[in-house]
Image: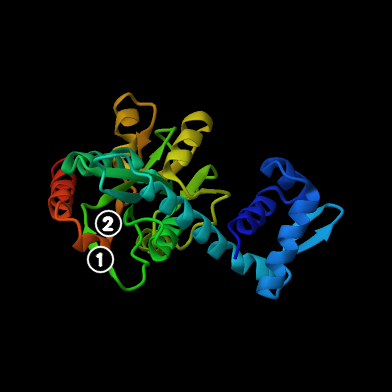
Amino acid sequence: MNLSNLQTFLAIVETSSLIRASENLNVTQSTITARLKTLEQELGQTLFLRRKSGTTMTAHGAKFLRYAEVMVELWRQAKQESALPAGVTALVNIGCHSDLRKGLGQRLLDDILGANENLAVSAWSGSNSDLSHWLNSGLVDIAVTNNTATEDGFRLHVLADDPLILVSSDPASPMRFDPRYIFVEGGEQFGHDHAAYYADADTARLSFGSANWALEHLLENGGSAYLPERLVTEYLEIEVLYRIVRAPKFSRKTYVIVNEKSADAWDWLPDVIKKLQHATEQKGN
């Protein structure tokens, strides 16, 4: 299977157009068409439907997408690792949930860089589902996440809980039935606990998959939401946001997940994990 064909497939997915894909890749449209035809013949499946309004993936194309992404990314990593500068012996790929990047993610990055001067590090930020996919496909070796959904072959290290509190731009905001309430994804356990406590509440009109994005919206537009306590402390202190004190306090677990095969080759890793665990216990993440 040709790498150029995979890159062409991903370009068509990104642009929803063979013409725009050819422009992005700086090749002719006939080249794009030929590469796509070759790839579809190799797979024995139609990957796209062509319409006047644009190009859309078929069900077979959607299934193939994640494999194409993995193959192209693994090739990029292979090129990067084979071209490491003199004195650098290994490449470590780390992933971090976007809400944990500031704090836990940065600490992990700093500790790894400080643990061995012969390491090169590649860092990625994404959602919990992204991180599970990246771990299981081998795109990252270590992940900081709120989710434990991985396959066999990984070691799970528990970090301190991440407390979630109900905050609002209005100190008189109701604990229940706030029409401007924003639901923020906080992981499986939070979702279960939240649904149980607010079983009589309507579905929120607005929801976010990122606490950071939800906070930005809250500060600009007002409303209320459950957010990580560490994220809103400064805004509570200057009374830009207010804690709804009657509301229950929830929490979500945070973890460092490591590929076992990679971990066996890293004698510096146990100290890095212990240091990270100690930091979260002492100061919170």
Check the image and name the residue furthest to the right: 52
**Point 68% across, 65% down: residue:** 39
Mark 2 and mark 1: Cα distance apart in space: 15 Å
On screen, residue 20 versus residue 72, left or right, reads: right
Check the image and name the residue furthest to the front: 86
The crowd level at tag 2 (other Cα within 10 Å; few <14, some 14-19, many 20+) is: many
Q: Earlier in the sequence, mark 2 or mark 1?
A: 2
Whether residue 97 is visible here, answered yes or no, is no
Mark 1 lies on residue: 260
Residue 171, position as x, y percentages in the image: 39, 33
**Point 71% across, 73% down: residue:** 45
**Display coloring:** rainbow
Disc 1 marks a residue whose amino acid type is: Glu
Disc 2 marks a residue whose amino acid type is: Tyr
The crowd level at tag 1 (other Cα within 10 Å; few <14, some 14-19, many 20+) is: some
Q: Is residue 93 above or below residue 220?
A: below
Instruction: Give the label on residue 255, or none.
Output: 2
Q: Which of the pair 122/77 is nearer the observer?
A: 77
